[in-house]
Each structure stands twice: as C-alpha cells, then as structure tokens.
Image: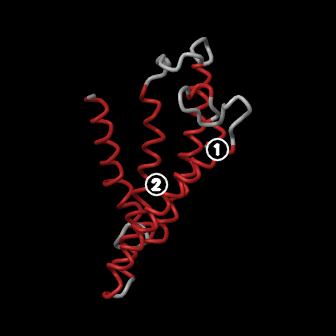
Amino acid sequence: MRRLRWGICVFSCTIIFIFVPLARKVTGLERDISFLSRMGIDFISILATLVVGFMEIKRKNAAAHGISDKADTMIPIPVFWLVPQYCLHGMAEAFMSIGHLEFFYDQAPESMRSTASALFWTAISAGNYMSTLLVSLVHKFSAGPGGSNWLPDNNSNKGKLEDFY
C-alpha cells in the first residue's frame, strides 16, 4: 500500500512540477492550458473505455479456464488491473469538470455564473440517467431465447460486457 501511495504522489508531483510549467511555456498562458483545450482532453475517456473493454476480454479469458460456470469463484487476476482504467476515467473527468467550471466562472457574465454551474450539474445528472436507461435497454433487448443477455444478473462470466463497452 505504501508503494501505491508513493506512486500516486510521484504522479501528482510530475503533473504539477513538469506538465504545468511546460504547458505554460508552450501556450504562453498564465493558466497552463486554455479552457477549451482542457475540455478537449476528454478524448481520454474514449481511451479509458477501450481499456475497460480489453480488460473485460482479459478477465473473461482468465475465467474461461474452468471457472466461468461458477459465479462466486474469484478470478485469478490482481485487482491492480483496474488501476489504469480508473486513472484514465479520473483524469478525463477532472479535466472536463474543471475546464467547464473554470470556463463558466471566467467567461460567463456575473449574473449567469450560478445558473451556468447549475445547468452543468443538471447535464451531468441527466447523463447519468441516460446511462442507466442505456444499460436497461441493452439488458432488455439483448436477451436471448434462454434468458441470457449481455449483462446477466447472476454470473458476469456468461455475459458479453466487452461488447457493451
């Protein structure tokens, strides 16, 4: 656990002490990168989703060696295989959220700042509801004749979660 904490500290310091001054020098801006560039970095979320899909394929291949029928059996893959995808999603979310909020507070008129911020959070919540709707629709319409579908309730080893990603 100490190594993980140390690694996170090194990564954070690298971002602060190397990326920010380098970005300031390249862009010539006091803020390291512009608001729109910061929001444009959200392509990282596409990369993160691809990583999640490939990790699901790896997990299912590991489960295919005699344990795919047992829903409660632990698959012999270290939990640290989740770290890259969560780091990528976290970075994408941080760049997007911070870029939006800085854009609203810097570019919006004084009277619209709170409204713009409220609309931002409303859009985030609407996106979460749309994601839930998408999962429900995939669950419903991918059902096969035996009741199996892409997102099974009891055994994820039988599903096709990689196709969902």
Residue occupying the far top of the picture: 66
Mark 2 nearby-residue class (10 Å; few <14, some 14–19, many ≥20) = many
User: Where residue 163 is drawn, which disc sits there?
Assistant: none
Closer to viewer: mark 2 or mark 1: 1
Where does label 1 land, which residue? 140
Look at the image and tell me in which quarter the N terminus lies.
top left
Q: Position of residue 27 (x, y in %)?
A: 45, 70
> Which residue: 40% across, 63% down?
97
Q: Is residue 87 left or right of residue 155?
A: left
Q: Position of residue 25 (x, y in %)?
A: 40, 66
- Residue nearest the viewer, comparing 82 with 66: 66
Dot 2 amino acid type: Ala
Q: What is the CA distance from the residue labelled 2 to the residue labelled 1?
A: 30 Å
Task: Quadrant for the C terminus, please.
Answer: top right
Work out whether 51 lies above or below 119.
Answer: above
Quarter of the image for residue 49 reads top right
CB under 8 Å between callouts 2 and 1?
no
Image coordinates of residue 24 in percent, x first then y, are 38, 67
Q: How was the colour assigned to the protein in this rendering? A: secondary structure
Q: Quadrant of residue 112?
A: bottom left
Of the numbered discs 2 and 1, the one sitting upstream in the chain is: 2
The secondary structure type at the circle numbered 1 is helix
Q: Where does the image place residue 63, in percent across and percent down from the top left?
A: 58, 19
Q: With respect to residue 76, does 58 lie above or below?
A: below
Q: Nearer the viewer, residue 68 or 37?
A: 68
| Location of mark 2 (residue) | 92
Can you say whether 69 is above or below 10 in the image?
above
Callout 1: 10 Å neighbours few (<14), some, many (20+)? some
Give the residue type at disc 1. Lys
Q: Is residue 158 left or right of residue 71?
A: right
Label 2, secondary structure: give it.
helix
